[in-house]
Amino acid sequence: MSQQFPALIIIVPLLAAFFIFTVSWINRKLCFPIAVLSLAISLVSAMGLLGMVLSNGPVEYRMGGWPPPWGIPYYVDYLNALVLVVVYAVALINLLACRQSVRREFPDKIGSFFTLYVLFVTGLGGMVVTGDAFNLYVLLEIASLTGYALIGMGKGDAALSSLNYIFMGTIGASFYLLGIGYLYLVTGSLNIADIASILPGVYDSKVVLVAFIFCITGLFLKMAFFPLHGWLPNAYTNAPSAAISLIAPLTTKVMIYVMIRIVLYLFTPSFSFGALHVGSVLVWLSAGAIVMGSLLALGQKSLKRMLAYIIVAEVGYMTGGLWLGNTEGITGAILHLVNDAAMTLCVFLAAGTLMFKIKPSVAGELQLDDLAGSFTKMPYTMAAFVMGALSIIGVPPFCGFFSKWYLLSGAVTAGHYEFLAALLFSSLVNVVLFFRIIEIGYYGKPGHRAESGHSIAHMDEAPLDMLIPLLLVAAGLLAMGFYTDDIVTHVIRFAIPAGIV
Amino acid sequence: MKIIGFIIVLLCGGLLAYATSDFPYWGDPASPASMHVSAYYIENAVADTSVPNIVTAVLADYRGYDTMFETAVIFSAAIACFFLLRIFTPESSQSKLYRHIPTGITLRIAPGGKLPEKSDTFERIDSSWVPHDLIIKTACRLFIPFIQIFGLYVIAHGHHSPGGGFQGGVILGASIILFAVSNDLRSTISRMGEKITAFLCSAGVFIYAGTGALCILLGANFLDYGALASLMGVDPVSARSHGILIVEIGVGITVMAVMVSLYYILSSGGQLDEGL
Amino acid sequence: MHDLILAIMSKYNYWIYIVLLMIGLYAMMVKKNLVKKIIGMNILQTAIILFYISVSAKKDGTLPIIIHGPHAGHHPVRAADYINPLPHVLMLTAIVVAVATLGVALALAIKVYQQYGTLDEDEIHTRIRK
């Protein structure tokens, strides 16, 4: 059975999604348990796969029994297995926390929400684990389509924001497809490992250069790398809370994983860093992305919009880390991928919980001033939010500190001091942003929006099934900080291919 | 905005045109794209799967995993439209139109008024109604069964002629949409209801993924149809051919149901009572 | 000069697809009406499909269906006789994805229309600001 883990990871949620949709017409109460069960099975398989990879090395699974490159293989190595565990863990924890919020926002469409949810996670998981470039495109489109629908059901101008997201996302995916087509034209194969072995013979072809540019540009569009980030703030602010705490931690991070896979394993480092001298330009662009993301976050009054701009800055961290081109930088990028998924989940879950309990003053968007006095009313939620904030700022022993440390040392080694400056600047801005919230929450009086009407508010804490997953994630941030050394030496060090100094 | 757009377009176009100088000539049989993987497919498809149509063999067997996810894409499009638009309690702020058949008088019932009971003299019409045309209705009624037979033929004969699950499914869906366009949406929904369409959407993809899961239970890898040989009592190569047929049928069912469901939801704005 | 003309004439299919791609991209970026942007998206995806299909052509090749059926075995199949089937397979998938994206985009456009009463982007922005 353990041989079939790679298939089980994808098949069980896929079958469950179809099942949930059919069952929702008969009995609505069964949808949630089926979704939880399927994601739990996938998480167990993902952890089993990670164990297998740690003990025996990379695992290959052949779909349909055909050897690559005739068939489609799943190729699970160190990088994959780690990201896979992260994806399913985030999805499962969020699913447990979002049940009440879903029941409040879409009471009659629970079945289709969970179907879209499970299909989204399946698409992301498949993207992480596949070894075929075209298969990646198909799974990218599954994840994107379900994401568009989940975002489009929010309040305010969610439909328009989602439509803009469709336009930019489709251009991104089409550029990626074009790049893969060009690679097929000169190599004749679609398998990642196969292309990587044929490409060195055609490195000086203009076709490969243009393919590289289009693939990377397409991925930049999908991961909201400044200045192609226009869709992200609107889409993430207007989406329903249950959906956004799934989409925000995962979408951009999995796109960054795809970029790492393509830059390091498809176009091997000798091409990406050697033949092409774009590394410095991209590090400058990443520094710009970090600075602009942080500056734009400073000017926001709405909580979710501020968090969305912080995500734009975080994307800059990881992209810059990859293009620094040295071991510490890439280690920092991969470690930050894992950490940022957890940190973003923590703050977005906390924001969702706050939105569930506090009535916002501006329709739909929770303003920062609405959080006045929330430390007394909802202490546990705010405690978890503070832990997420400290991790984003980069305070030890939280995990955010360690990934920033690797990125900083990578920047120093490569001599890219502008990246170092941008990282420090963004940490300072994050301090300002989050301490502003802490100050409003701690010192502000819970005003006219208090539920009870007293000026001394009693505790009106969130329901337990939203609180426990949130505290679990916050504790996880601490645990990942303590185990950073294990993660780096046992997993990430093997994920970086040979050829990087 | 126009100038920025123009500059971006010129840059992208220029970049792509720059790359064409290194392309192989059009139609060159020795280009890298035609060697290696695709040459293997052409030379070995019949020996491996006994299906002469190489496109079907590659689609449903060698790269069958991709096709399963493609079917999941179209399924998620149907779910997405359902999730976004479907309204179960229609707004009662629209006035309804009824037509008295013997005299041809149209009644407009204001919101909240009493609706005429179901009888043969009153029929409900759409707000954008045109007088029914006997020629169109009769011609479509005569065509639709033949279109459906052709759709079934395309699915079933996909092994030997161009065709397969997607093409046949779209033809079948088009036949039902033709009925909805020539008559009205309500009579189509009474014949092919929303629940049965939703069930068929999931059933088709379930057949596909279920066949793959069956292969796992029989001991081989996912979607390795050779494992079905023990179940069907034929040799592995013919089992692949039969496996391809089964998944094509699943794909056809899903595509038909999704086309119909998308038409229902999009043409009536989610309310499923008044269509085009 | 002769080389340039030869280069253009032997690869004219690629020039056509580039022109279509740029038309689609321009429409998506510049047009104000939401439906025109959706049409531009469709043109973009169709251009890429056309590119892949044109890659699969071969001089003197025929349809990729083995002519004598499964009971051949007389002469071995030669790859140069049949056109390349792989891009056709890939584009079946891409067409389905394009249709699915079109469906979801139209559903969202209907939702926008139900909310704002117009499909023009400038109009919608003025209505949001009010």
Image (cartoon, coloured by chain):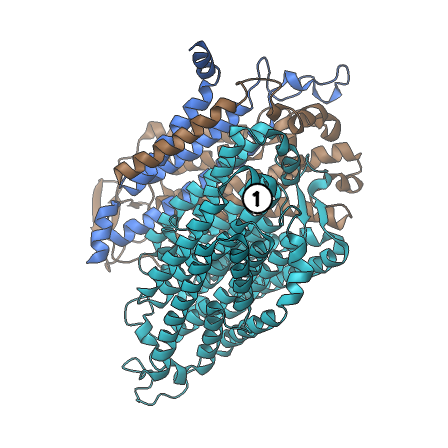
Chain shown in blue = C
In depth, the one of C94 and A472 nearer the eye is A472
Res B187 quadrant in image: top left
Q: Residue at x 65, y 38 (%)?
A: B246
In the rendered image, which quarter contains the C terminus of chain C? bottom left
At 35% from the left and 29% from the top, the residue drawn is: B136
Q: Give the residue type at disc 1.
A: Ile
Query: Which colour is chain A painted?
Result: cyan
Residue B262 visible at all:
yes
Q: Label 1 is found on which chain of the structure?
A: A
To which quarter of the image does residue A118 belong? bottom right
Q: Colour of chain B?
A: brown
Q: Up-down: is B196 above or below B229?
A: below
Res A153 seen here: no
Q: Is residue A122 above or below residue C52?
A: below
Whether residue A88 sits left or right of residue A112 in the image: it is right
Secondary structure category for the residue under label 1 = helix
Of B238 and B58, the residue lying toward us: B58
